Image: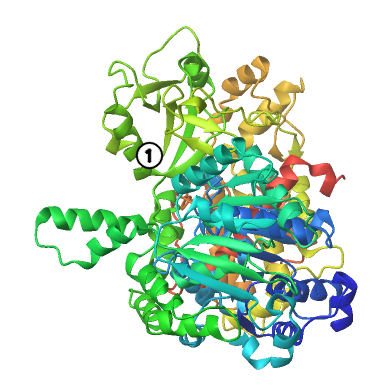
Amino acid sequence: MRDFFKNKLGYFPYDYQVKVMEVLLLGKNIILSVPTGAGKTWASVIPFLYAMANPDVHFPKKMIYSLPLRALANSIFEDVSKIVDGTSIQTGEYSKDIVFSTIDQTLSNFLCFPLPLSQRQANINAGALIGSYLVFDEFHLLDEKLSMATTIGMLDMLGNLCRCCIMTATLSEGFMKALKGKLENYEIITLDDFPGDKAIIGSLKPEIKKKKIQVIDDKISVANIIKKHKTKTIVICNRVETTQEIYNQLATHKKNSNDDDAIENTQLICLHSRFFDYDRKEKEKQLKSLFGKDANDQSVILISTQVIEAGMDISCEVMHTEISPISSFLQRAGRCARFSNQTGKIFIYDVLEPTEKEKILIEAESKEDKVEIRKLNNKYLPYDATLTQKTFKELKKHETLGGNIPNQLIESILGNEEQQIISSMQAGQGGGFNKDKIRESWRTCQKNNYRNTIRDIQSVEITLMSHEMENEICKYPYRYQSLGMYKWSLVGWVNRISQSENYDPEDWLVKALEESTIIGNDEDDNYQLTKITDFKTIPAQVYVNAKYFGYHPDFGFNWQYADTFGYISPKKEYKQKEDEFKALSKDTFYQHNMGLVRAFEKEFLGANSSKLDFIFKELGRFIQMPELHKDDFVRAIYLMIVLHDYGKLNTNWQSPMQQYQALKENISTSYPAILAHTDYDGNNVNDQQIANQVALHKRPAHAGVGAMVAQEILPELFSENDYLKSSISMAIAKHHSPYSVTYPKFAISDENYQAINVLLEQFSFGIALKKKGYEGKIEGFETDWYGEQILYLFFVRILRLCDQKATENLKKYFND
């Protein structure tokens, strides 16, 4: 393992990294806590790469690496891409061997409301997590009641069906022990057990006075930033508005500077969440060249929000930061003197002026005093004021962050509080940790479950538009880029603008998109924009008037800087999409099913048929049937595929298909094959006429028929196991939509039945299927155990993806 690490990265691992590899590859999960810059990313990634290179190691063949912020996911993706084949790695999507994702994407996929997909596709990606190696980086940044609790609930539900590494630099010892107590088969690894590593890890050297700190009882000072600047300075603010204000003050100072000025030749960079995609990505690229390990000597000051406080491998010699809770602060400090033998100074500022701070310490006597104190405490947002103030007070006791001081700070500030967090997470119904909410999400597949399980930040997507763009937006509302911000911040902006003397009451500030109720001559004009006057009702997507709002590539979206007004949203990069109604490709019932079989073998089993070995070995134990092995599960999947379209043999389904294809091909006799698909083209007028003639679009639903017969014959083949019976049958029922639970009246002729009998004989299934039935509802899950639904999510992903792939490109998988 040491040699493998060296071959990949060019240097030998630390002892703690070897321990991580050993623990994971021997079958346990890990809670890993090491300081920032100590190599925890590679500690988690290399075990997966080692297992991929050594197939005999019992370990998952897919890794999903989740982070709280998209910028962090992109940054780590770029680092890992340098040593991994690009064909096996991606961000966001879930089809490759290595996936870098945001925690929102990962959880929404598992919860069956994937953010970028439609509800009909809601049950496709959840199964990707089953049998995968899951890494959760910067775990401390998750919302304890929502995303953190849901993640713990998910991991508890998955149990032995995954391997997991939870990583952070800032969890208390008590929290880690409590977390280990709630999850099965986890081991805690910290640097405390590896004193030899502490002595040689570059980010911890020099040991004495590596990072000096100075706490200042005042707000952040532009004058002090200029005065203390050397070559590389990072300024971190809690709010975007403060970031923009400091950037513009520095830019003004630089513009008016002379040759003796400290920042006359200094580059300024502003980064936060309110940039359009291109500008944000360009800035992220710049940071690595200007603040990375191999940075040039360019003098530069970065002014940012907390978007850079975790995951980014950058460093400075001087840092100025507004105070934040200790976990956040230590992450910020990790961007100062990060690399070997660097030293740095961190200046820590309050968010209140001394006079304001005195006010919040005085007991409120009147209603006006209470309102004023609440406003002052709100200046600590987005953080908790009490925890932030406690951090500020504790930091005053120290002059450096060397040695064990960070751990002392975590324990003194968070120790008792974090242990209580675990208890509160567990206090919910259904075993706590949002498990009932997870099951409700599986049931409804509704995106409104997001606020109950992942994140309760009310974000608004904003498009900057001019009056001249209105007609185009009504036709193509999603053609322009948007950027996000907190809803109530935008409400505050528009209220102030609407009350200013520059605003014309007859004009508009914000518009919302609605489906048009006006039928015009242009059939494409499906939307209209409606002026919003009650700003509290702002929806999740809005269009704002560029006459009153500004944007600048250097410092982003704003309302304060009039010289940036008039900037409109850029258009999205347009990629030609295949027509949603493209012509289908005709295939027979046999060809289609064999296409699915080959797609399963190629895409899921892999070239050496081993890609699912980990999950097949663990599934038997998970469903308390250890006698079931890989061959049994593969055989169950073959049966699922063979049965999935059994309903297409129903006379009321097959006859219109054959009639349509015979007319299209000018065949005067009955069509000579049992079909799975015709070559109907919805864009072809002649095809539409033939389809109407034979009532092609009035065929009954077909998925439920295969699900119903599966429930009858599965017990014969796999003994009496309710889990397999319900999970496979529900996967068949829901292979087009997660809401399908019924089957129609059906009658399958002997001639049509022969099409499936060929497949049953080919795969040695000595069974006879029911040929007639009345309409009804498919029995759902047989037990109350959540594992039954997890098994269904595993099977339905395989079936749906194989069905999609074989339908889109049959010749790739089966050409006979």
Q: Is residue 436 above or below residue 483?
A: below
Q: Callout 1, which amino acid? A: Leu
Say left or right for 266 vs 321: right
Q: Is residue 600 visible?
A: no
Seen from the viewer's position, the closer of residues 380 and 774 is: 380
At x 59%, y 44%, the residue is: 650
Q: Is residue 99 above or below residue 42?
A: above
Seen from the viewer's position, the closer of residues 15 and 24 is: 15
Residue 212 at what x, y percent from top left?
Answer: 58, 74
Q: Is residue 347 visible?
A: yes
Q: Is residue 109 above or below residue 678?
A: below
Seen from the viewer's position, the closer of residues 312 and 626 is: 312
At x 72%, y 48%, the residue is: 285
Q: Which residue is mark 1?
A: 490
Residue 430 at what x, y percent from top left?
Answer: 36, 75
Residue 25 at what x, y percent from top left?
Answer: 74, 83
